[in-house]
Image (cartoon, rainbow, N blue to C red):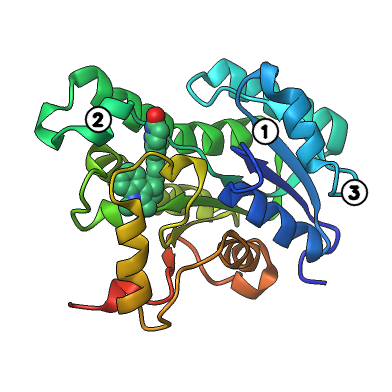
Amino acid sequence: MLLENKTILIMGIRNKWSIAWGAARSAAENGAKVLFTFMGEDNREKIEELISEIPNAKAYTCDASSDESIKQALTKIKEENGKLDGILHSIAHANTEDLRNDFITTSREGFSHANDISAYSFVAVARIADELEVLNEGASLVSLTYYGSTKVLPGYNVMGVAKAALETSVRYLADNLGKKNIRVNAVSAGPIKTLSAKGIKDFGSILNVVEEKAPLRRNVTTEEVGDVVSFLFSKMSSAVTGQILYADNGYNIMGI
Ligand code: IMJ
């Protein structure tokens, strides 16, 4: 199996619709031992119930806005499970008003918050995992991004700026960690109805446009995105680093 004898940490699980959950199922199906981090100790019961269908899965709380919290989580994870072969960063947040109003109204605080949680936290995870020697030789770090980093999508706003910072961070991290044979990539997923898309104005029409225009004439599923993440965790991608790999049924290649 593709991920046999590998331990994979999935950071940012919320519910069964999360891309993180699609990635976890794919990693588990391919033979990996899967661990999770989630936000907020209050959610432990719900998360443990969800992950109970994956044998030997364990969940740890982690607040991506705090280096101290990331350190605590990674220390405990290493103590209890040994070193990791892969980490998926599936964490993003912007203030709701910054996704509802015109981009020009974004406050200094809102801009900083979106970039802190959605981009900087990946840099912090990479650095702390490296410092604490949490990663095995040949490990693979993966984050999730979106086309709104590159093109204007209505309402994506400051998240587009944060994803651009994330994608550039992927390239610089890939350079820094390449010396240690650690790879760093991001998967740019097509739009999916997750909790992060809930309440987003006209989300349904965005899904319809993809169905109509994407070369494969359909939307992507969390399982399909998860399979691409598994490829990046596997030896099959040993020559791939610093890349933004689109899992969007080809939508991004179209000019119109
Ligand atoms: C989000 C906003 C606007 C347009 C959007 C999205 N499109 C897609 C998304 C077209 C696909 C979902 N996406 C890719 C995200 O990265 C979402 C991030 C996000 C969502 C929320 C909603 C609730 C909240 N803060 C958020 N922060 C980040 O309070």
Residue at x 37%, y 83% (from the top left corner): 215
Q: Residue furthest bottom?
A: 215
> Which residue is found at the position 71% from the left and 38% from the top?
36
Of the residues shown, which amino acid type is indicated by label 1? Thr
| Viewer-side residue, 241 vs 152 | 152
For disc 1, the marked residue is 37
| Mark 1: C-beta under 8 Å from nearest atom of ligand 1 | no
Q: Is mark 3 within 8 Å of ligand 1?
A: no
Query: Given the current orientation, which residue lies at the most extreme left position?
Result: 104
Which label's residue is closer to the chain start, 2 or 1?
1
Q: Which residue is mark 2?
A: 98
49 versus 2 height, above or below: above
Helix, strand or loop at label 2? It is helix
Please tell me which of labels 2 and 3 falls first in the chain.
3
Q: Which numbered tag is attached to residue 55?
A: 3
- Quadrant assignment for the C terminus: bottom left
- Viewer-nearest residue: 60 or 137: 60
Callout in the foreground (2, 3): 2
* Image-based side of 219 in relation to 255, left or right: right
> Which sits earlier in the primary sequence, circle 3 or circle 1?
1
Residue ranking furthest to the right: 55
Q: CA distance from mark 2 to mark 3?
A: 39 Å
Marks 2/1 in contact by CB < 8 Å: the verdict is no
Residue found 45% across the figure and 41% down from its top: 196
Q: Residue at x 51, y 69 (%)?
A: 240
Would you call the spot at circle 1 few (<14 residues within 10 Å), some (14-19), or many (20 or more)?
Answer: many
Q: Residues within 10 Å of mark 2 (few under 14, many from 20)?
A: many
